[in-house]
Image (cartoon, rainbow, N blue to C red):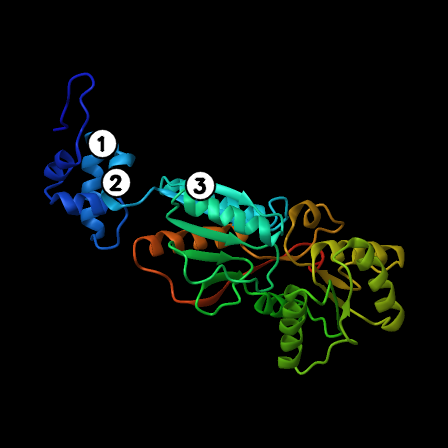
Amino acid sequence: MPRTHGAGRVTTLSEVAEAAGVSLSTASKALNGRAQVAPATRARVQAAADRLSFTPNALARSLLEGKTGTVGLLTSDLEGRFVLPILMGAEDAFGAGQVNVFLCDARGDAIREQHHLKALLNRRVDGIIVVGRQTDPRPSLGQDLSVPVVYAYAPSDDPDDVSFTPDNVVGGRIVTQHLLDCGRTRIAHISGDPSYAAATDRVEGSQAALADAGLAPLGAPLFGAWSEQWGRDAAAQVFARHPDVDGIVCGSDQIARGVLETARDLGRSVPEDVAVVGYDDWQVLSTNSRPELTSVDANLQELGRTAARAIFAAIDGDPAPAGVERLPVKLVIRGSTIARR
């Protein structure tokens, strides 16, 4: 039977442990999500806590474990298209763990970043997630910090750090393989700024897929700006040089939108005459295109959740392996590659 208390009476962890038939330490580990507890035991402890309306005392727990229950999120571009989904995914994981978050935006300024880093350490955060604005490696914060650090989206340039980033090489491969599967064999590639790792990685994956199929790219990849205007201009070049092009891989959805406009202006039907694919699955663009745009979803929210889980594990003394882990991306197929029946 559930245990009842008078007004103001608070259930203790000892009472939860007694009700679940486990030791005090086991009850604590179970409710704090530690890995050393068997699933059946964890479920029994949680059920007892629910019956007794047990609410953990966050202050007491933090004092007992020497932790503050806070994590720092240090970003370079809070207004960025890619940073926000990552932060949302991390927030999901932090919310589930009842962790408080200090969010700091360095705005791409190294001096401002060091100021925020010092402020986070002075607040005695338990860990820090550093979120970059692009997938190019960024300078490490160093190995002498007092708390664990995980890098998300922009990997650290130090192989001893833990980093998570989308697998853009695989993304370029799967989107090109999709065009091949649709019967396209004369495939061009239009991408963004070649100084970005994202641009060159996606081209690398795309050309690898073509090589595996025994095909050559239709001309050299065209690099330019991450914009619809560049997509329009580059598509005009492709159609002029290669009138028989039947597939175009674009390095971003903005570029792909420009390609669709030029194809329409030139009377080239998409996808009947030429199939077009984008990248990033920015739905304000991909789902509002005519036709809707097939694109690659980098799973940025899952990237944020993965980084948050890695910080949890590191705080508990079980850090992830050092190095860069490239996380899976997925293809979202829409009308720009599959004709309606």
Q: Name the residue under label 3.
A: 101
Residue 105 image position (x, y, % from top left): 57, 45
In primary-sequence order, the first of circles 1 and 2 is 1
Tell me if mark 1 has few (under 14), some (14-19) or many (20+) residues whose alpha carbon lies within 10 angstroms of its own: some
- Give the CA distance from mark 1 to mark 2: 19 Å
- Give the CA distance from mark 3 to mark 2: 18 Å
Residue 173 image position (x, y, % from top left): 61, 70
In primary-sequence order, the first of circles 3 and 2 is 2
Q: Residue drawn at (83%, 58%), measured in percent from left and top?
A: 232
Tell me if mark 3 has few (under 14), some (14-19) or many (20+) residues whose alpha carbon lies within 10 angstroms of its own: some
Of labels 1 and 3, the one closer to you: 3
Relative depth, front residue between 157 and 304: 157
On screen, residue 206 above or below 156? below
Left or right: residue 341 compared with residue 104: right
On screen, residue 5 above or below 240? above
Of labels 3 and 2, the one closer to you: 2
Residue type highlighted by circle 3: Val
Figure quadrant of residue 221: bottom right
Q: Mark 1 points at which residue?
A: 54
Q: Residue drawn at (45%, 54%), measured in percent from left and top?
A: 307
Element marked by disc 2:
helix
On screen, residue 179 above or below 281? below
Residue type highlighted by circle 1: Phe
